[in-house]
Each structure stands twice: as C-alpha cells, then as structure tokens.
Amino acid sequence: MRCYAVSMSSKDSGGSSFSSFDALRKATHDGPEKELPAPAEEKGWTLLSGDEEYELTEEELAALPAVQTDIPDRISGRPSGFGPMDTGPDCYRDPKSEELGILRSFRLRTIFPKDVLEETASLPSDPRPEDIEGRLDLRDQLIFTVDGADAKDYDDAIQIEPMEQKGCYRISVHIADVSHYVCEGTILDDEALARGTSVYLADQVVPMLPEELSNGLCSLVPDRDRLAFSVIMEFDAAGERTASHFAKSVIRSKKRATYRVVQELLDGKDTEETRELAPLKEALGHFKLWTRKQQALRDAKGSMRMQSKEKRFRFDDAHEPVEIFIAANYFSQTLIEETALAANQAVGDFFRQKGLPTIYRVHPEKDPEEAEKVMALLEKVGIRVPKKERLSGRDIGRMITLARKRVNAEALVQRIMGLVEKAVYEVKDHEDVATHWGLARKAYLHFTSPIRRYPDLIVHRWLNEILNGDGEKESELRGEGLLLDLNSMATHASHQSSFAEMAERAVFDLKVCQLMEPMIGQKLPAKILRVNRAGMEIELVGLHVTGFLPSRTIGDRPKFEGSTLTIQQGKRLLSFTEGYSIGIIIEDVDFLKLQVLLALAT
C-alpha cells in the first residue's frame, strides 16, 4: 500500500506557471476543437505548432501514442456493490424493500465487496506511532468539532487563536487525513472513486468509505489521536486572509459539540449541556466575531446568502414515518460553514498561485437568454428585478428576502431560483480560472470533506505531493495523461453527486407516501404554492407535505395569468391564486410514481 509522506509548507507564495493548459485540454478532447484547415492535395495530416508546419502521413499519425485514462476501467472493474445493507433500519436490510429498489434504480453501491472489507481489516483502529512520526503535533491544542446531533463522520475540527494585533486571528481548520489510509492504487481508492460521494437519505446513510474509516479511524472523534491535514490561516482585523500554510498533523479533539448546544452557549443560556462546553466559550466568542466579518465580506462581494428550510422525518418505534418537521437553523452552522469556505479557498488559491490544474467546484452563471425569460416572468408576478447587465448572488438573495414577505412566497422563491444554475466539478487552472457564481469566488474547490466526497480526497493527495515534491510532481500534474484522469474523475464525481441528490429526493418522496397512506380519503386544509396552466402545487397545512393538483381533475379550459389560475367547471369559473387556501382530499397514494394523488374538496 503506497502512502504519502508528511508535508508542511510556508506561507502562500507564487510559483512557476505553464502556458499550454488550453492546448492540453484540447488534446484530451475536453470541449469543442477548432477545425484545422483541410490538407493540401496529396499530403498527409497536418499539425500546427506556432508558426511552423509539420506534415505527418496517416501511418505516422497512427503510430503516435494515444493519451488514455484508466478511470472508466477502474470504475467498471469493481465487483458488484449492491445488496441489502447490514446497518440502519430494517427496510434497508430487506432485498425486496421499496427503499432498496430506489437505490438500485440509481445504480448506487450499498454494500462493500469482500476485497474492500479485507483491505479495511488490515488498517488499525487508531494511528500507529509510525503514522504520527514527523507530523505537526497539535494534540495539546484546544481543537474541537461542531456537527449535527446525529452526525457520526466528523471530518473537520476547528481552532482559533487571537493574534497580537487587536481583531486579528489565526484560524486552523483540521481535516481528516483520509489520504493517509485510502492510498492511490488501492482497492479502497477504487471503491471510493466508483461511489464518488456519500448519500444522505431521510433515514439512512450510504457511505463512500466503510464505517471503520468514515465513523472510526478517520473521524475526528474526541479524546483520541487522529491524523489531519491542517489549513492554518491568518486574518487581519477586517477579516481578510493575509497568510496561510498547510501541514500534515496529529490532533486530539477536546470536545464534540452540536450546533444546538453551541448556539445556546453563544446565546448565553445556562444549562447542563452548555456548562459542559464552558472550555470552548472564549474560542466560540472569537469565532462569532470572525464569522460576522466573513459574512460582511461575502455580502460586499455579491455572494448569495439565503436561509433554506430542511425537512426531516420523525419515526416511531417501528420506523414508520409519523411526522415531517422543519429542522432548526442556527448561526453556529454558519460559523462552521465559514471556516470550511475559508479553508477551501486557501487551498484553491494555492493551486492557482502555483499555476497548477486541479478539480474545482464550478458554479456557472445563468445563460443570458434563459435568464431574460425568467426575469420577464418575475416582473409579471410583481418581483422587481435589478436593472443591471449581470445579476450577482447577492441580488438573488435580496430578491428571495423580499419574496418571503409575500403571501405566495414559496412560488416566488422557486421562480427566482430559476436564475441559479447547478454547481459541478471541473478541471481548471490559473489561466482558465474556476468561477463560483453563487459564492462570488474564484478558484474555489472542495477540500474539507474527504470522508464523503472523492474530489476532496484527490485535492488532498495532490496538495501533499506538491508540498513535498521537488518539482517532479508539478510536472506530472501538468501532463496530458493526468489531466485526462482528472477530467474523467471530475465528470464522474458530478454525475455521482447528481445521482445521490435524485436518490435522496426519491427516498424522501417514498417516505411521504408512507406517511400519507393512512390519510387516504381525508379532507385536509392546503395552501396554494404555485400555479401554471397544468395545475397547482399545494402544501398541506401543518404537515409540510407538498403535492400537485392537475387542472384536468377540476374542469376545462384552464388559463394562467401571473399568479392566478382560472378553470371552467360547468357553468362556474373557478379562480386559484398563489398563497390562498383551499380544501384537498387525499384520493390515493401511488408508490410507483411516488406521488400523493389529490382532489379538490367540494
């Protein structure tokens, strides 16, 4: 098993650059290629380079070595990874369950093949002395984790130290050093590549790594030695990062805190739980001040900030869904998000300054023509769109804030979100700089979750190689073969991320059907969320369940104008406006289409 050496670097610095990234990308068929001039009569193929022209016959061209990647073969070569799971609720252990049927339809890997389990069994339960040797020893530092109450895979821990100058801080984000154990070329690595991401379902987690790693050896649990890759940053009084460096380290988390209790501590509540976190009170106070500065900087740059509502299920003892509730939103979550954003940005900036390609998180701006159509629709329903050439994420956030004050807030927010594209993984460099429109950032990547995201693991490996290398690894990273590998990995990771999201939505919809089945035939109050000519999306009051009521089930000749739908029902003309209340009957539940079938109550 090949593993990597310990690495430390000095503060951010520039580095050598290369000028042929675009050429390399074209050579690997990433994107459209320009058509070359047709060769002259009786000549072979022509390759152009600078001002010189070289002529190759078809035989010479065929003899050139092809640039290839083995990534698809590594993925397709894995043994079957689907079957009943041995953890979680009984429905995921039953091969005939609807839950497993959904996961199968998205080709998700639910079990770890024998070869993965055998390789995992060879790993220790805690770091060995030889694993720790040469690392930056931070075990005596006040380092802690803050996660959700039900989290088990703690992949990031934080630390803050006030500097001599008032308002300046040294902030360290310590990330689980997964790359020390999941080494390149191993079976574990191939399995993680194939999965691409962990999948977080309503009542189950399908992990990217075996639990012995994700919840054990790599998880930054309290009071146990753990290997980390540390991002150590310095910030001035305005909140701007002034320096950063990176180090392989060994840490020993002092506390495992939850968002709720941290928030109660920040709010000054005196409870048994907050008293247990008393040693963190001063540090959390500093983090609070620093986070406020980061939010102000994000706002100034046009970053999109918005509060989202996360729906969760509550289950009974038989694991039947009994309720959907809205999860609490805490400032403490924002605090942790800002530390992750800062660490991700510091690593991205390092690659950019070095002039090296890597896998970035890219969030494209909406196509102008598509954006025009959405903005025209928003104007019709009374949402004032800023009159400017390019909208920023902050503009979207402000529009959503205003929309939430309207009676038809949900419909307006959905329409506004039509201006936002989906983020993907792409290979970029210092010339073709990655842009994240929503965050208003450049050269932003994912580094802080290698337990659950494969691109983070790749960035970890290459950061370590560059920090420890003598320039040879930088040359390798610029090579055509590796560039093709990175592109293939990025595309696969984007696809797996999309499959995971779709599977999460499908399982959520299944749980909704299970929740609503006992209510078939009942008349319930509902609120109209959004209308169009085909019908209306409604939400059942107090249940947090949404459904669609088709126009054809109500009457004829539907007409849609602005936020109102009118339908002819016999001699009556019925009008339905977003934000208003109606009565609904639960007609049936369709477990094939994962839909709750609704009818208008009369």
Image: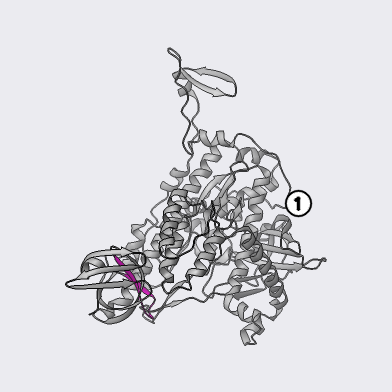
Q: In terms of depth relative to the viewer, which is nearer, 1 or 435?
A: 435
Q: Quadrant of residue 154?
A: bottom right
Report the colour scheme.
one colour
Q: Is residue 339 left or right of residue 542?
A: right
Q: Nearer the viewer, residue 242 or 472?
A: 242
Extent of the magenta region = 534-547
Q: Is residue 135 left or right of residue 68?
A: right
Image coordinates for residue 48, horizontal then vertical, percent = 54, 23
| Magenta-drawn stretch contains 82 | no
Q: In this picture, is 48 found above or below 97? A: above
Q: Toward the viewer: 377 or 251?
A: 377
Q: Residues within 10 Å of mark 1 (few under 14, many from 20)?
A: few
Give the residue at the far bottom of this rendering.
271
| Prevailing secondary structure class for the magenta stretch in the rendered image | strand
Regarding residue 60, the answer to whether it shows in the image is yes
Give percent across and percent down for residue 559.
Answer: 27, 64
Q: Which residue is mark 1?
A: 10
Asked whether residue 92 is in view, the answer is no
Q: How many marks?
A: 1
User: Label 1 amino acid?
Assistant: Ser
329 in relation to 76, above or below = below
Residue found farthest to the top: 42
- Give residue 77's position: percent from left, percent from top: 42, 46
Is residue 542 a member of the stretch shown in magenta? yes
Q: Is residue 497 left or right of residue 346?
A: left
Q: Picture quarter containing residue 114?
A: bottom left
Q: Residue, x 44% and y 71% (percent of image)?
A: 409
From the image, which quarter does the C terminus lie in? bottom left
Residue sitting at x 52%, y 23%: 47
Secondary structure beneath dot 1 equals loop
